[in-house]
Amino acid sequence: MSSTTRTTMRTAGVAVRAMLVLTLVLGVGYTLLVTGIGQLLLPAQANGSMLPDDRGSALIGQSFTDADGQALPQYFQSRPSAAGDGYDGAASSGSNLGPENPDLVDTIAARKAEIAKREGVDPSQVPADAVTASGSGLDPHISVAYALLQVPRVAAARDLPEDEVRALVESRIQGRDLGFLGEERINVAELNLALDDREGE
């Protein structure tokens, strides 16, 4: 066997062994390490931030409508979604329409009129997040203003005192990230589940 062949075989053997070692260390070991750290330090987040009884994830919005797409009066409504048929995690997307696009302008006007009628308020009182989809189409949050706007309807539909429903909303307010990023917000699915659980007690 020539020295060139021996060198080639030795190099190939080193390459194969290096590949196997690196696959075990980086492909298996690192994955197990990171998964273990996640499960130990942040188990809820590592497992998808699931809501109780596997009723969805706190990270992905949900629709609270009937089969015809009409808002269920006993539930707080989420912001619109442009992801597939609505909150489709496999089709995350915004509308990609510019602020002066006639279709978007008409859609926002129609949503504003519908929400104003449903909530019994002037269209000027409808917050922006109530009529516009988020960039991902999956945002599980609404503004505090939009949640408070819905309190009278939800309270009436559930035959609860408005003060009690308002207090529940205020107890679910999530602060700004790091104390200064973004706005205060409310997770709609968590709020609606808290309402259901309260009535079930």
Image: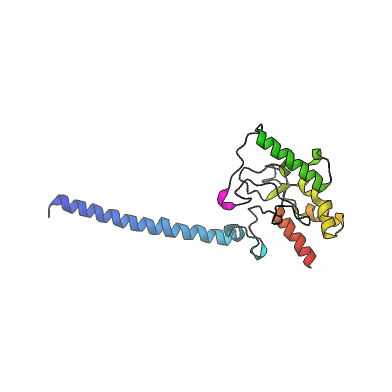
**Residue 30 found in image quarter:** bottom left
Q: Range of the magenta residues?
A: 82-99
Instruction: Tell me if 64 is positioned left or right of 30 in this view.
Output: right
Name the image quarter holding residue 123.
Answer: top right
Q: For this view, does 133 lie left or right of residue 36?
A: right
Give x and y (percent) for residue 196: 76, 62
Magenta-colored stretch includes residue 145: no
Residue 107 vs 74, above or below: the answer is above
Count the numbered circles shown.
Answer: 0
Toward the front, the furthest residue is 68
Q: Residue extending furthest bottom?
A: 201
Residue 101 position in % (x across, y down):
65, 33
Q: Residue at x 65, y 55 (%)?
A: 58
Residue drawn where x is 25% and y is 53% of the image: 12
Query: Which sits in the foreground, 185 or 63?
Result: 63
Q: Nearer the viewer, residue 197 or 106?
A: 106
User: Which residue is depicted at the point 30% across and 57% down?
Assistant: 17
- Looking at the picture, how far across and down is residue 186, in whole percent? 73, 50
- Rendered location of residue 54, percent (x, y): 64, 63
Instruction: Compare residues 154 and 37 and report the one nearer the observer.
Output: 154
Task: Using the rendered view, name the quadrant where residue 110 is placed.
Answer: top right
- In magenta segment, residue 93: yes
Residue 40's place in the image compared with 188, above or below, is: below
